[in-house]
Image (cartoon, rainbow, N blue to C red):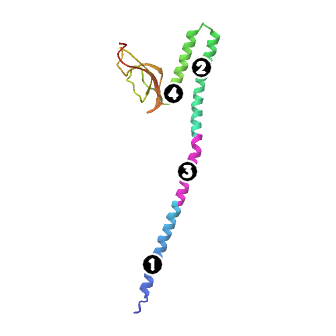
Amino acid sequence: ADEAGAPGPEGAEAATDSNDELAQVMAERDDYLDQLQRTRADFDNFRKRVERERPLLAEAGVRELVSELLPVVDNLERALEALVAAGDQGAQGIVSGVDMVRQQLGGLLAGRGVEEIPAHGEAFDPNVHEAVQGVPSPDHPEGTVVAVVERGYRMSDAVIRPARVVVSQGGGPR
């Protein structure tokens, strides 16, 4: 190297190494940026595809449930036809047939994870019961469900429909 500060052979080599290193880092940066942009585009496409498919999946679930319910509807129609044909005779057979249909539907719902919410004789729970009436009842403590107007159902921990109930107000008429 000369004394004026001009780089000698070692300085030129260090500058070349530095430029090579800088070029390599810039190439890596560009590669990472390209990967990030591709990943973003892939994720955006995935999100759009899921949004498009969501209604189709929901419809398929409804279709499957309806196809399982149709035999129940058929049996109810048969029960009504038998009731009309039998007149007053055969009422017990009709009651039996309708009960079988109710059991069939109950089994179908249970198979889907739907369960009845216990109500009669239970303590009133506003999370799963809906009080439609309060009545004095010397036979039941206050806040006890004394009658079920409409059964309630849940699936997992989610209430599908609360049980509509009559609740004891305790004591009797004074």
Mark 1 or 3: the one toward you? 3
Q: SS class of the residue under badge 3? A: helix
Where residue 128 sits in the image (x, y, percent)? 43, 28
Label 1 to label 2: alpha-carbon separation: 87 Å
- Does the magenta-highlighted stretch encompass residue 50? yes
Left or right of 73? Residue 170 is: left
**Residue assigned mark 4:** 109
Task: Say which amino acid is labelled 1.
Answer: Asp
Numbered badge on residue 98: none
Which numbered circle lies on residue 17? Answer: 1
Mark 3, residue position: 46
Real-space Cα separation, disc 4 to disc 2, in angstroms: 16 Å
**Front tag of 4 and 1:** 4
Residue 76's disc is 2
**On the rendered image, what quadrant is the N terminus found in?**
bottom left
Upstream in sequence: badge 4 or badge 2: 2
Determine the secondary structure under disc 4: helix
In the picture provided, is 130 more to the left or to the right than 53?
left
The range drawn in magenta is 37-56
Q: Position of residue 98 (x, y in %)?
A: 56, 17
Q: Cα distance, mark 1 to mark 3?
A: 43 Å
Q: Main secondary structure of the magenta part?
A: helix
Q: Earlier in the sequence, mark 3 or mark 4?
A: 3
Q: Residue at x 55, y 10 (%)?
A: 92
Which element carries disc 2, helix, strand or loop? helix
